[in-house]
Amino acid sequence: MDALAKPAFLTKEEKPAAKPRLLAHPTAKTGLMSWLTTVDHKRIGFLYGFFALFFFLVGGFEALLIRTQLMVPNNTVLTAQQYNTMFTMHGTTMIFLAIMPLSAAFFNFIMPLQIGARDVAFPRLNAFSLWTFVAGAIILNIGWFLPAATHGAPNDGWFGYAPLTSKMFTPQHSTDYWVMGLQLLGVASIAASLNFIVTIINLRAPGMTMMRLPVFTWMTLVTAFLIVLSFPAITIALVELMMDRNFNTNFFEVSNGGMPILWQHLFWVFGHPEVYILILPAMGIISEILPTFARKPLFGYPIVVFSGACIGFLGFGVWSHHMFTTGMGTVATAAFAMATMAIAVPTGVKIFNWIGTIWGGHLQMRTPMMFALGFVWMFMIGGFSGVMHAAAPADAQQQDSYFVIAHFHYVLIGGSLFALLGGIHYWFPLMFGRKVSEFWGKLSFWIIFAGFNITFFPMHFLGLNGMPRRTFTYDPNMGWNTANFVSTIGAYILGLGIFIYFATMVYTYLSGERVGRDVWDARTLEWSLPNPPPEYNYRVIPTVHARDAWWYEKNNPEELAQERAEHAKAEAAHGGIHMPFASIWPFVTSVGILIGAIGVSALGPDNATTATRLTVVLSGAVVMFLGIYFWALEGNEGYHLHLDENGEPAEEEIAADHH
Amino acid sequence: MFLKSLLPTSRAEFNRWTRAVLAVSGLALLAGCKFTDIWRMDGHQSTLDVAGPVALAQRHVFYVTCWVTFTIFILVGSTLAYATLKFRARSSDDQHAPPPPQSHGNPLVELSLIALSVGALVIIAVPTLKGIWYTYDVPVQQKGEALEVNATGYQWWWRFEYPTEEATVSGTVKMPLVTANELVIPAGRPIRINLRTNDVIHSFWVPKLAGKVDMIPNRANFLWLEASQPGYFWGQCAEFCGDSHAVMRFRVIALPAKEFSEWLEQQSKPARDVEPGPTHGAVAKAQFASLRLPDDFRPNETGVTGRFEIDPLNAWRSQQMPNKGEDPALIAKGRQLFQTKTCIACHTVRGVLGAQGITGPDLTHVGARTTIAGGLLENTPEELRRWIHNPGAVKPGNKMAVGFLQNNIHLQPDEEVALVSFLESLK
């Protein structure tokens, strides 16, 4: 580094004095400000997890209300409008505010650790993604607190089929909240995904080749590409819908020649990859848990990775299997049916490989392993009913019936959620240095497992017996009474299991058993860290020699220790550990977006003057642009940490970051 | 800590806990209901207990997928179960044993499993393709005998039009025959139904006869179905279409060919006029007095009785007969109210002056239908009165409730009775 090559104002001596006060870097390490300004991927991951689990409970509560309404025929716990709002918000919440952000929590927390990085590529963009996600969640849910006659929470289904969403059929602002909420969540997801892609491609530790990446990181990469490629489709659809509702365009306005079927194509071009966005991270987690507790490497690593990528590619060519009943004609129906069946092959391959991983292992039946095995069983059932849907003539009967509800809850609860809940158990010791009690972990697993199956297995029969979904009531003479009753009881059992799970987690977080490093004798790099991992993650950037890098290191300690000592010296000579500054501007930018979005969605000709609406929207825009401006002005500086023997920061110095 | 005190000390204790929980939840379930009929899939909208060639073809494809996936499930599942049991660590020694050989996979096993999966999918794909083409349109050789019907979805009811049948409006004025919420078809003959919508997307589904096809604005969809035998079938909208989607229901009645043409002939006539004769006024009023009043119904109370459970087709036939004890004076009053209370603005009743509205269902022969309110309520005087008394309470958000409100329509109890008498007389 040549100090002379740098502009004078960036040199170490002058900088602190030269800073304008407004741009002073936030330094809080604890308290509210530290959370609002954090750019640490682990803290951001924690916040993603916190919000996701909160909304998971909200969505679960909505589900219990739905099941209570359907417990007996002609029930009156909810009105038709309330019921429609509940199933709309249950679906939207679970997909966009629970499962996706919970996956994002793992992407954030675990992925950089797995590739031996000190943070994601763009730490402030990461914070921006988080706060924009929160803004989207607020917009989606704001209608609950406003009068239902003119506002209300979204109630046109999570799929929002045109023309039901048009002003003519839904004049309330509820649909505007849905449009703006999803739009913001899309911004957050795309920003986060670009960040993850750049991180995985560029910030891998030396020796961490693509074919040595842990499978969870691979699935993060595939998922991030799916998000980047699929969200633009729904972004366009939502913009068109917003224009139709607010500026009298005619994309979906039937009376003026609009085409409602266009919405379905755009929605499912996003919506089907979204399904894989929900399940691929789960598959990644399972591919980490099974080898750890079988104590042998993943069976057929290359083919598991390849099939994951293959699912990602094929996932873009099957969207119309959600539209088999829209009268697409024989050839299109046949093509999408065949393509959909083809996806069963790479999916099946994964299951074979997971069984191959278990085969010949020494299985440690710990709680994460229980969830992982539960996942394989439940996902298998969900996959088989998926093949039944791929057979288009059979789907003509199943589509929009309870059979479909059974199918996708088997892949989303039995699949995604089991994996995520197992993942929390698995990485809890790393994240918090405490281990969840095996007894309470297993108890909650078995109750969740039983409750889940009692809830959703009877729905197969309900669907085959002709019960359509999204119905707030049914008559007692249809033969649906018993299955519905059993299903509701199952839902309460599932709720109890989830309650025990959460209570256990909170208890463990506060006063669970403390454990040391690498409690599971695991295989991937993140387990080489002390727990909880320090702010800078790796004292020395590791060098990777094998696929299961940490397992290799444990088996070759001398070689690695020597190598690490050399690298430590080199890094110290380089100026210590470089850390990014915390920043409030991503948060400010998101707040600006939130204000603008409220202006667009909550205000309209019916309740505000043009001047008021413009004022709100423009002030949001001003705050957003100020945020971006000061964010840009901050530059990409950071500071250096010099660690003492124990890994504690001995000294911090401001760094001019140009290396 | 409190929680710690609950922690079990051994594995055996854990198993006891698990068993206790499972046993309690199992007992709760058994106490609550009969388990046996959960497996029965022979309801009115069963997709397995089918009654026509299209639904049969769809069920065939479903059974193929069932058997193939069931076989794979047994094979893969038993392998997984075996591996889990065989390789699990059983003791503390197992837990701390040195790791097993670190094998990385076996390409030969992988490739053969992939080949097997592809083979299994081909077994499903062939009948799937056959089914797609068969269920799409009436087979060529049967095209000539197919009956064409236009079905239009409305929030939240169905309009059925027979474009080839002429119905008399009055004198020599004719229009295509239109009915609502009950589609009557000839058995043993393919029916080609053009699917249209008046507002949002609906989906036409009579599970025992055929899978669903959507009614989408600006899109000329159709489906075909056939009832092999005469019968009475339940159908329902299968695409979410707003507030009352759940109660947008209908019936399909399949009749023998001769009976079907008699029905067509009867339906083509204008609305029935009850001959003035000996008055039964006292009887009719007494009948109404014994009925439940509209406000006696609980919100969302079911509108079905057991009348259609045993022999629905004959129940439908009896509905075609004129009611006993009709009161011509009361009916005449009802007919007048039908005009003055602006019912005619939305409803067509052929033969009633001014009744040419098209926003609501055609009511020319409403008395002969077995259901009202979009297949939701059985067509009895008390249900009909419940419906016109407060349509919004029966079917949230429906247009009749909105119309009552906007046009400031209020019905007195005796007006309700007269209107019901008139509508029930329209056989």
Image: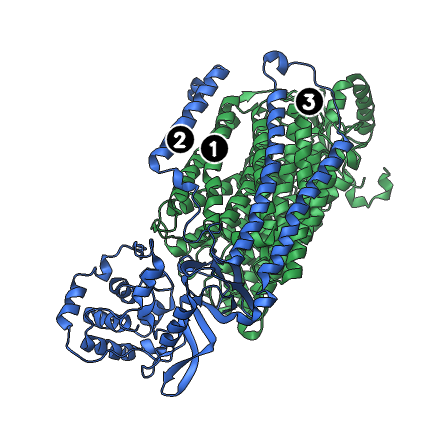
- Residue extending farthest front: B258
Q: Which of these two is toward me, B214 or A193?
A: B214
Q: Position of residue A421 (x, y in %)?
A: 55, 34
Label 3 and label 1: CA atoms lie apart by 28 Å
Q: Position of residue B58 (x, y in %)?
A: 55, 53
Do the CB atoms of the residues marked 2 and 1 lie less than 8 Å apart? yes
Q: Residue at x 36, y 87 (%)?
A: B171
Image disc number at residue B25: 2
- Which of marks 1 and 3 precedes in the sequence? 3
Task: Using the rendered image, report if marks 3 and 1 lie on a common chain.
Answer: yes
Residue A579 shows in this picture = no
Q: Where A505 falls versus A595 (above or below)?
A: above
Give the quadrant of residue B356: bottom left
Give the quadrant of residue A367: top right
Q: Give the number of marks.
A: 3
Q: Amino acid at mark 1?
A: Ala
Chain in blue, by letter, is: B
Q: Residue at x 51, y 29 (%)?
A: A445
Q: Amino acid at mark 3?
A: Gly
- As drawn, is B331 to the left or to the right of B141? left
Chain of the residue displaying label 2? B
Q: Colour of chain A?
A: green
Q: Residue at x 25, y 57 (%)?
A: B297
Chain of the residue displaying label 1? A
- Secondary structure under tag 1 reads helix
| Pointer 3 residue | A360
Q: Where A322 falls versus A569 (above or below)?
A: below
| Pointer 1 residue | A450
- As drawn, is A581 to the left or to the right of B39? right
